[in-house]
Image (cartoon, coloured by chain):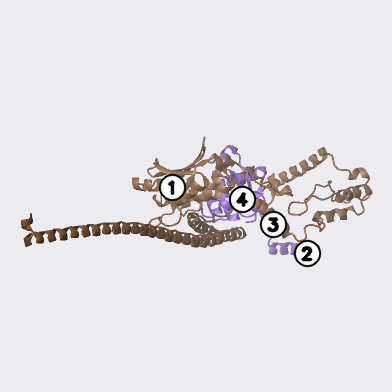
Amino acid sequence: MTAYIDDPVFWALVAGLAATIALAVSSHRRTRRARQEKELLSERNDILEQRFAESVEEARTRAEHGTKTALKTAMRTLQGLANEQQIAISGLQRKYGDQHILQDLLDIDHMNSQFGRRAQSIAVLCEGWLGRHRSVASVYDVVRSAKGRVRHFTRVEIHSQTSFAVISQAVEPVALALAELLDNATSYSAPETTIDINIRAVPKGVCIVIDDAGVGMNEEEKTRAADLLTNPVSGVTGLGNPPQFGFAVMGVLAARYGFTVSVDTASPYGGVRAVVLLPQELLTSMPEPQPVGPAAVAQTAPAPAPLPGGAAPDPLAPSAAAHMPRAVPHSGPRPVPDPPGAGAAARYDVGQDAGYGAGYGEERREPRATTRGGLPKRRRRTPMSIVGQHGQDQDAAAPRSNEETASIMGAFQRGTRTGRTVETDPEGREFR
Amino acid sequence: MTMDGTGHESVDLVRPYVITNGQELPKGDEFELVTLVTAADGGARRAQLDPERRALVELCCGGYLSVAEIAGHIGLPIGVIRVLLSDLAGNGQIVTRNPVPTAQLTDIQVLQEVLDGLQTRFG
């Protein structure tokens, strides 16, 4: 061993070994440090990536929210204008109902309805205002309302009516969803084909079945439609290019109001069969139809008409009632003015015998009933003869018996009927 | 829209062009304001009509009503009522009768001749 001590090679080897060891140790340390740094960096990277994703998401949400708010506000204005315009058009239709211009007014009305529907659809996607409050309407009327909102509405044929009605809150959403379905049906079918609507009562509610004879949908389209109908989207992004509103709008409305729309069956005519199922919760029975015609005119309407469909609370009613007294200045302490008829009655009192006059006086002292709005209610009065009662005894002034009244009315009716059935020749002369 | 409380809410919801189903307004003077209309027999078919047409036929059941009166009661523009009436008349569900024509004035010349004749005879 000692023999090597003087050998320079030995020392060189020892030095080399030491250097190698030192090198190895330092390299190991460096590697460890590098690994630690790498771990640290990757952690930081993860955090950064996460933060980046978060801020992207946030920016998107903010942008979405901004778009939604802007669109919602814009649509609200447009919807308001469309409604205002509809009221104006209705007024014009009544005013010029007898003239040729009516045809043009009807066309403008149709365009306005379509315009209003478009605005409504965008508003629905932006969680906006859906439209005016409606009262309870029959399913048939809701379907007809939807029909009026699409361009080629004359191709839509409604084949059945039901006695069911849609509750007030659901009238507008159901009509809008149906209009979107009808829009699809009319757009994707040949112009000469019809779109058939059948309304069926089923145990779960009412089904509205819409059949078109169009080209139908392929599997991909069906999947996309089903997806939009079951998982409603929010906002106007992701509607595709060109954007397709229809199913997205229906999906949002169906989820919000609790009805279902399905388009997965094929129509017997080759196109799409869309089925809208309105559950019992959205249905009510039809309000009693109000009499139309002379009977309605004869009836006095003192109290505000009962709200149709008691089951559905009318959110507008209380506010409307609250507004009404304000419209009538000093409605509280001011004495209620006599109705126009009372003045005439007072004039007839003059010169009549005391008993008759006293009867009126008594009646007028009674506190008058008023409507909720503070307007006087009309009251039933004792029968009054137009012919003066001068010089007649008290018996003559006594009210007629029921039989007498009936016979007088009968005679009057017979007279008018004969008058109406008398035949006339072209010269205006009568013959029987 | 302010309605007169006679239940015309559906007018607002269902627009008049839907009620006429986009039909052209009748061109002729078949239904003047004073043309009288009454319902024909055949109540069974009424059930298939839409609410406005049914209301119209039921309104006319009691006797003759003028077109203007019908429009007033139903609350639709007169042109729209005319479309409904021409539909219903086509189906034979209503009967119309022309208004009583105004008496035609006698020719002034004839009157003058009669006057002259009377004057020559008695004057």
Q: Residue B32: x and y, percent?
A: 61, 55
Chain B is shown in which shade?
purple
Specify whether residue A8 is in view.
Answer: yes
Q: Which residue is mark 4?
A: B9
Q: Earlier in the sequence, mark 1 or mark 3?
A: 1
Label 2 to label 4, Cα distance in Å?
68 Å
Residue under the point 82% across and 57% down: A335
> Is the Cβ of the residue at disc 2 closer than 8 Å to that at disc 3?
no
Tell me where residue A405 sits by quadrant: top right
N-term-proximal mark, 2 vs 4: 4
Tell me the amino acid under the disc marked 4.
Glu
Both on one chain, marks 4 and 1? no
Where is B26 relative to A269, above or below? Answer: below
Image quadrant assignment for residue A399: top right
Q: Nearer the viewer, mark 1 or mark 3?
A: 1
Amino acid found under the numbered disc labelled 1: Asn
Classify 10 Å Cα crowding around label 2: few (below 14), some (14-19), many (20 and above).
few
Q: Which residue, as the protein is rendered here, is positioned at the far front?
A: A2
Q: Quadrant of the C terminus of chain A?
A: top right
- Chain of the residue that carries numbered disc 3 in the rendered image: A
Q: Which residue is mark 2?
A: B119
Q: CA distance from mark 2 to mark 3?
A: 77 Å
Q: Are marks 2 and 4 on the same chain?
A: yes
Task: Select label 4 or label 1 by which is in front.
Answer: 1
The kind of secondary structure element at disc 2 is: helix
Q: Nearer the viewer, residue B9 or A170?
A: A170
